[in-house]
Amino acid sequence: MRPIHPTSAETQVQIGAKLRSSRQAQGLTLEQLAAASDLTKGFISRIERDETMPSVPTLVQLCQALSLPIGSLFEEPDVQLVTLDAAPRINMGGIGADERLVTPRAEERVQVLRSSVEPGGSGGDELYTVSCDVESLHVISGEVEVRFADRSTALSPGDTLTFPGRTPHTWHAGDGGAEIVWILVPAAWSGSR
């Protein structure tokens, strides 16, 4: 029979990976963090591997050395699932394309669209731009040609083309249609705006 209340072993917070990630994102070595926090390299390594649970004062030392709010170590990540079946249909201007927003509507950092394109479907005859910094197009199946003002690029399944989002372009699917994933950074459109 399982106890009604979880034991401390079942609920132990795993903060090591968050500390390691923060240290590495800042380009710090264990030695540098040890010097900045007045702790030993070996002790910090054990904390990062969740082999030991540091005291609150030790966590404060580490977080100060990393300029990391101590509360962020205990926050749950914001994980959101959008299934393809539940993804809302949107109209980004594609002709003959069933376009679905597969990231949450309110997500502003990145936007991922999944397009099922009919044979000969396109972004239209005229070049257009998207209000984002970076645009990537990944072809899951079919053939797609992307046309810019000065050139065209043919894409096959598995190919990914990345370019500045504000670059005038258009696209055209081949005779067999295509399945395409578009990645826009930051999000070009949000249903929450």
Image: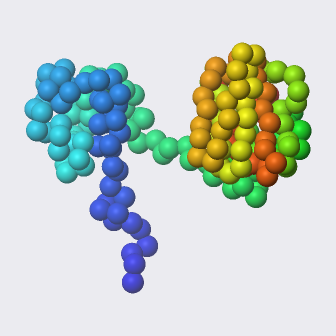
Whether residue 161 is situated above or below residue 169 in the rendered picture: below
Which residue is more in the foreground, 12 or 115?
115
**Residue in view at x 20 percent, y 27 percent:** 29
Residue 69's place in the image compared with 42, above or below, is above
* Residue 43 x/y as whole percent: 13, 39
Figure disc tally:
0
Q: Quadrant of residue 32?
A: top left
From the image, which quarter does the C terminus lie in?
top right
Foreground residue, 119 or 89? 119
Q: Is residue 74 left or right of residue 50?
A: right
Q: Residue 48 location, x and y as percent?
A: 24, 42
* Residue closest to the eye, 34 or 185: 185
Quadrant housing residue 9: bottom left
Nearer the observer, 123 or 14: 123
Left or right side of 31 for 187: right
Where residue 69 sits, quadrant-wise, is top left
Question: For this view, does 169 lie left or right of residue 140?
Answer: right
Q: Which residue sits at x=43%, y=73%? A: 4
List the single residue furthest toward the bottom. Answer: 1
| Residue at 23% across, 47% down | 49
- Residue 76 percent location from the top left of the image: 48, 45
In the picture, which quadrant includes the N terminus? bottom left
Residue 5 at least partly seen:
yes
Q: How is the image coloured?
A: rainbow
